[in-house]
Amino acid sequence: MTLDDLQRRLAEFAAARDWQRFHTPKNLVMALSGEVGELTALFQWLTPAESAAVLEDPESRAAVLDELADVTIYLARLADVLGVNLLEAAEAKINRNESRFPVDRFD
Amino acid sequence: MTLDDLQRRLAEFAAARDWQRFHTPKNLVMALSGEVGELTALFQWLTPAESAAVLEDPESRAAVLDELADVTIYLARLADVLGVNLLEAAEAKINRNESRFPVDRFD
Amino acid sequence: MTLDDLQRRLAEFAAARDWQRFHTPKNLVMALSGEVGELTALFQWLTPAESAAVLEDPESRAAVLDELADVTIYLARLADVLGVNLLEAAEAKINRNESRFPVDRFD
Amino acid sequence: MTLDDLQRRLAEFAAARDWQRFHTPKNLVMALSGEVGELTALFQWLTPAESAAVLEDPESRAAVLDELADVTIYLARLADVLGVNLLEAAEAKINRNESRFPVDRFD
């Protein structure tokens, strides 16, 4: 499944349930933010080292995967409603970051 | 550019600057959350209708694309560090949602 | 109960359970952020007008009060751990905002 | 300055600028969330130990105080618009938490 496929499937899912009227960019930004909040809650008391091992416990693994899925879903849906290509936008941003943080400063 | 390509490029970007030590899942969740906060700020005073037209103004358009890029970048990087396939996780979640919200309830 | 009383009570609550070691500023910022995410989720599909009436439904009222309490608790605890007086900081900020947004520009 | 005083001053500030129309609970939740995002960004790359010393550097101190002020301001304003007493809500929640997490389990 590509990001395009995901967006197509989410659009159909929303249309079949007449949920498009809820899917304004403003509402979808809030939904994305709410899901990131739930993801954050899973990591809040972990040390950085514990956070790196979070998938080893089956219960934590399921919870983290579930929240990452929700974040991905709302980000993909938001971009689709706005008509933004997320991968192009990200690529353009990395190109700008390559200039802002030239690698020879880190040698 | 696919999501895989993006993740590869982000991994190289971090390695070239010796930033992997900052890229624990805990820190990346915070970075993702911070960027979603900046995205939220762009929409906070807009009505839902205004939010649907947010890309029409060139300045707002650039700001929204920039924040969506940052959100995508940190989500992709977080997933890569954790070893999670975001598109598979999202697909599995939609499949579960199809059962939770059967479409005939919405006819 | 004043904000000072709340902070004292939260400090005792944490001490009695040996939770101070979890209460680093970094962790408490994440906890605050997670609770704001839960609050956001309660408002995400509401229109602005619906959001103004959110307390009229008893179930929504209980949920909103519960999340506002959690946000207040983690903000108060974070400030206490950092040694910051929130009300003084807010007052100083309003004073700066009075200069940034002079009222005669809005007449 | 008490929390009540802060809320009174924020209400006057908004009224003098005709900003009440923007201050729906939905919008204020987003503003609160945006400010928590900015606060989060200040802590994202810090270790827990570094986060405990964040106020020692004058520049970081000013930035953290500024964001804590903004978070406090929007939380206070949101509660005022909703007609919620934050300190009472927090006290009620701590009372519930005393039952949920009895202290003798932690001895």
Image: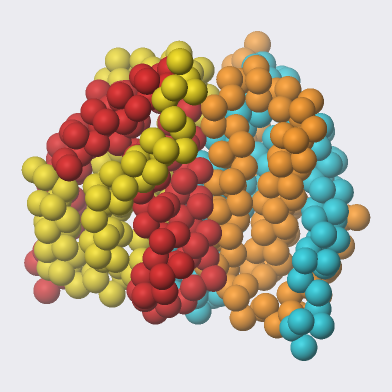
Chain colours: A orange, B cyan, C red, D yellow
How many numbered marks are there? Answer: 0
Considering the image in quadrants, where does the C terminus of chain B appear?
bottom right
Q: Is residue B15 visible?
A: yes
Is C7 situated above or below A83?
above
Relative side of D39 to B6, left or right: left
Name which residue lies at 71% across and 41% down.
Answer: A63
The residue nearer to you, when weighing B101 against A43, is B101
Q: Residue at x 25, y 50 (%)?
A: D88
Q: Is residue D73 visible?
A: no
The image position of residue A65, as x and y in percent, is 76, 42
Q: Name the residue rendered at 41%, 70% in the picture.
A: C58
The percent position of residue A87, horizontal first and vertical second, equals 75, 51
Return the residue nearer the eye: C17 or A66. C17
Q: Left or right: where does residue C54 sit relative to residue A73?
A: left
Counting from the top left corner in percent of width and height, residue A100 is at 57, 32
Instruction: Residue at the far right: name it.
Output: A1
- The one nearer the camera, A82 or D104, is D104
Q: Is residue B31 above or below residue A66?
A: above
Of all residues shown, which one is farthest toward the top?
A: A107
Dividing the picture into quadrants, the one containing residue B85 is top right
Taking the view exactly as shown, the residue that stands out farthest to the front is D104
Quadrant of residue A91 in the image?
top right
Q: Is residue B64 left or right of residue D21?
A: right
Q: Is residue A58 above or below residue A47?
A: below
Horizontal and vertical percent position of residue D37: 45, 43
Q: Is residue C106 left or right of residue C79?
A: left
**Residue appearing at x 49%, y 35% in the figure:** C30
**Between A7 and D99, the one nearer to me in the picture:** D99
